[in-house]
Image: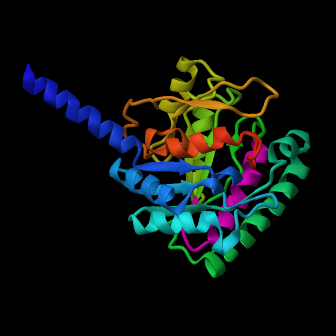
């Protein structure tokens, strides 16, 4: 019995460690309030949890560049790199992204996306030339979903754009997607699989944090995914309502094995060893750079 218990504990520990092998970090302006010593401890503790890669959601959000090459974000990420953590750096995010894609027709969406890719390419070049951080990949913070890309022509245009964009980068491109329940699971899986074949590492968000889809529906989408698509476990539960500024509380991410899929957790702010980031945010609720 004792041996079975030991085996179970080791298996559970391995599953949890694997889940946090990659963790997303979403920078907010308010995070500038943390000291270098606090950041160093966060990154030390992150590494001790088994994390190997930090995926930074963005390095520019509208007019905010978080201090640029000599700012708090760049300095924090240098500390992360010193702890042996690999960095996937997010590029440029338009604060009006979700509003804009709601309003645009297919032609307008394609033109808008092309402009945003141009902004992100410029940010990538700036990061290479000025921030000079070692990079293992680039993350495009424009999230995909099967509501705005329900039409086949939109998905085809997006695939062409991402393929061209990925070819201009000097490290792998990462993108993320979530399901709104509009495409059938098999069609959604084919779409995301096609994007990986076009040169992007796609991450599918499991939706546990937002809870917009029932568990059985979410599981259906997850089980249909090809192995090439990674799965992001959401370590939060949304408490804000529709139309309110986004608010969430920490929650334990789904510990179920992702099987053949790479896994990541969203996000560092909601993990126990990132508590200082969330505590600082709560002290300054009006200082955030984003509201979603």
Q: Give the range drawn in magenta.
A: 152-173
Q: In which quarter of the image is residue 126?
A: bottom right
Q: Residue at x 24, y 34 (%)?
A: 11
Residue 78 spot, x, y in % from top left? 51, 69
Say if residue 131 shows up in the picture.
Answer: yes
Residue 38 spot, x, y in % from top left? 49, 55
The quarter of the rendered structure image containing the C terminus is top right
Q: Residue at x 42, y 43 (%)?
A: 261
Which residue sits furthest bottom? 129
Residue 243 spot, x, y in % from top left? 82, 28
Q: Is residue 2 left or right of 188 when viewed as pictured?
A: left
Q: Is residue 231 above or below residue 12?
A: below
Residue 36 spot, x, y in % from top left? 52, 62
Q: In this view, does 68 lie above or below 288?
A: below
Q: Is residue 248 left or right of 274 when viewed as pictured?
A: right
Q: Secondary structure of the magenta portion, mostly?
A: helix
Q: In this view, does 118 lie above or below 219?
A: below
Q: Is residue 151 above or below residue 39?
A: above
> Could you say which is closer to the camera, residue 286 or residue 264?
286
User: Which color mode does the image show?
Assistant: rainbow
> Could you say which is closer to the camera, residue 189 or residue 265?
265
Residue 186 included in the magenta stretch of the image: no
Q: Residue at x 50, y 63 (%)?
A: 87
Say if residue 57 shows up in the picture.
Answer: no
Q: Is residue 20 left or right of 61 when viewed as pictured?
A: left
């Amino acid at each position: 019995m004792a041996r079975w218990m030991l085996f179970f504990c080791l298996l559970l520990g391995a599953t949890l460690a694997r889940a946090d092998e990659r963790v997303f970090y979403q920078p907010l302006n308010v995070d500038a309030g943390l000291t270098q010593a606090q950041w160093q401890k966060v990154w030390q503790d992150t590494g001790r949890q088994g994390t190997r890669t930090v995926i930074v959601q963005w390095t520019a959000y509208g007019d905010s560049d978080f201090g640029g090459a000599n700012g708090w974000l760049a300095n924090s990420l240098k500390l992360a790199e010193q702890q042996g953590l690999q960095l996937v750096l997010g590029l440029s995010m338009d604060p009006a992204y979700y509003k804009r894609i709601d309003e645009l027709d297919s032609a307008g969406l394609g033109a808008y996306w092309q402009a945003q890719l141009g902004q992100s390419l410029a940010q990538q070049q700036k990061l290479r030339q000025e921030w000079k951080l070692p990079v293992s990949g680039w993350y495009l913070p424009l999230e995909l979903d099967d509501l705005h890309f329900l039409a086949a022509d939109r998905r085809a245009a997006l695939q062409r754009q991402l393929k061209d964009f990925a070819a201009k980068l000097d490290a792998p491109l990462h993108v993320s997607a979530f399901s709104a329940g509009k495409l059938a699971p098999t069609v959604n899986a084919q779409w995301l699989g096609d994007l990986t074949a076009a040169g992007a590492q796609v991450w599918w968000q499991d939706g546990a944090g937002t809870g917009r889809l029932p568990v059985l529906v979410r599981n259906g989408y997850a089980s249909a995914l090809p192995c090439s698509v990674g799965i992001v476990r959401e370590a939060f539960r949304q408490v804000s309502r529709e139309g309110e500024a986004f608010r969430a509380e920490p929650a334990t991410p789904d510990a179920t094995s992702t099987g053949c899929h790479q896994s990541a957790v969203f996000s560092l702010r909601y993990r126990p060893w990132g508590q200082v980031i969330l505590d600082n945010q709560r002290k300054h609720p009006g200082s955030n750079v984003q509201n979603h």
